[in-house]
Amino acid sequence: MKLSSINQLFVAVLLSAASLSISACNDLLEPTPVQQLPDDQAITDAGSARSATIGVYDRVQAYYQLNWPVLGFLPGENVRFNGTLNQFLQIDQNQLSADNVLITEAWTQMYQAVNGANNVIAAVPGLSDPLLPSAEKNQLLGEAYFLRALVYFDLNRGWGGVPLVLTPTRTKENGRGTRRSTPAQTYDQVLADLTQAETLLPEAATRNRAVKATARALRARLHLYRQQWTDAESYATQVISNTNYGLVTPYRAISTAPFGSREAIFELTFSNADPNTMWNNWFPSALGGQFNFQPVPAAITLLNDPAVGGSRSALLGSTVIAGANVTYGNLYSRSAQRDDPSYVLRLAEQYLIRAEARAKQGKLTDALADLNAVRARAGVPASTAATVDALLLAIENERRVEFAFEADRWFDLVRTGRAGAVLGVTDQRRWVFPLPFNDLVADPDLEQNPGY
């Protein structure tokens, strides 16, 4: 995980959380991009192509380890920040500023991943190496297209339309002057990349690298966000019908070693040598953690309710501190091994995507069946929602519990237009994040989101 790197695409300097400031203007305007490829490190053969592709996964892993999940769950109502650091309090209170460290880090990490994918996409087609057969070449290209699609999808739902940089950054001038695309144009690019990825990727059941089903699952989510209900239903169905995947019981099995359960469509893998320290933010000090993120009482009540949470109560842990019971989040629990994955795509989401898409099309019986498949796995009674509105609300509430501590709740409420009613964030300008201040200074062609 390399959090202190330079955003090579927009020439922004990523400073540490302890020293973020605007004092070093000369350094800000004249850095050297660290992600450019010098001649002696170019993608020239099978080995360097494989390494470069793994490098893109590493950069995606960097923003999914902490920053992106936090931006997904902390603005919602399931989790509170249990500390004093301003960058987290801003997110918790929906009062983000353009110099927020997590915003800066996430944006930078994401564009580093884009540039890594661009390097693979540009170089691999021209390689001629007998150790790189055409099938593997296609796989590497497909993975790069998928990962670029994932990053641009996340950028779009976080910031709205963003600059689309589709060629490698070679110098500090590359990427400057690339104006922001509209949200529709950005999603069009995501769709183009996913379409290309699906043609190139293999049919396999790999859980921590992209395959055809991975591209189809993200495409189902994309169509959901675009309110393209027929396509969302179709692509979710393709994944649900794939016999390589299935809902697992008990619920805790999704987050139990050795990981990569049949429910996992795409997980980002960690190890003790390449650790995921997310558990440290959730565990109380008595268990060696910092307890930065704490489930709120309402979420604890929902998860512990047999008729709502069911077996999803396993997302909670409990310990006694100073004679009192303390409840904490337990999704990331491998404090010794530090190898919890980051959860990106799960089959339960595909059922709920299809349920929502079907409800929007008036297919209430089929939608209810999908919702109840997820509920049955959690051991809770079947829903009896009988109208479109009741069913959509039931699906929304199910997603709140099913993905309680994943990068989900905030984006769900924004895409459905419910962030005002549920969270009280009535200023819709605050439904997207601010572009980082450093990038705006470095590139005058970038435009800040209104309200910031």
Image (cartoon, helix red, strand yellow):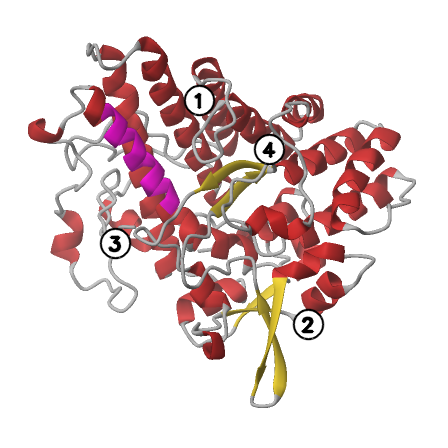
User: Which residue appears at 68% of the width and 38% of the height?
Assistant: 247
| Occupied quadrant, residue 249 | top right
Residue that numbered label 4 is attached to: 221
Query: Which residue type does callout 4 highlight?
Result: Arg
Query: Which residue type does callout 1 highlight?
Result: Asp
Q: Earlier in the sequence, mark 2 or mark 3?
A: 3
Task: Determine whether, in the image, residue 227 is placed left or right of residue 195.
Answer: right
Residue 16, position in %: x, y? 26, 62
Residue that numbered label 1 is attached to: 193
Query: Which residue type does callout 2 highlight?
Result: Pro
**CB atoms of marks 3 and 4 within 8 Å:** no
Residue that numbered label 2 is attached to: 297
Q: Residues within 10 Å of mark 3 (few under 14, many from 20)?
A: many
Residue that numbered label 3 is attached to: 14
Q: Earlier in the sequence, mark 1 or mark 3?
A: 3
What span is colored magenta in the figure? 49-61
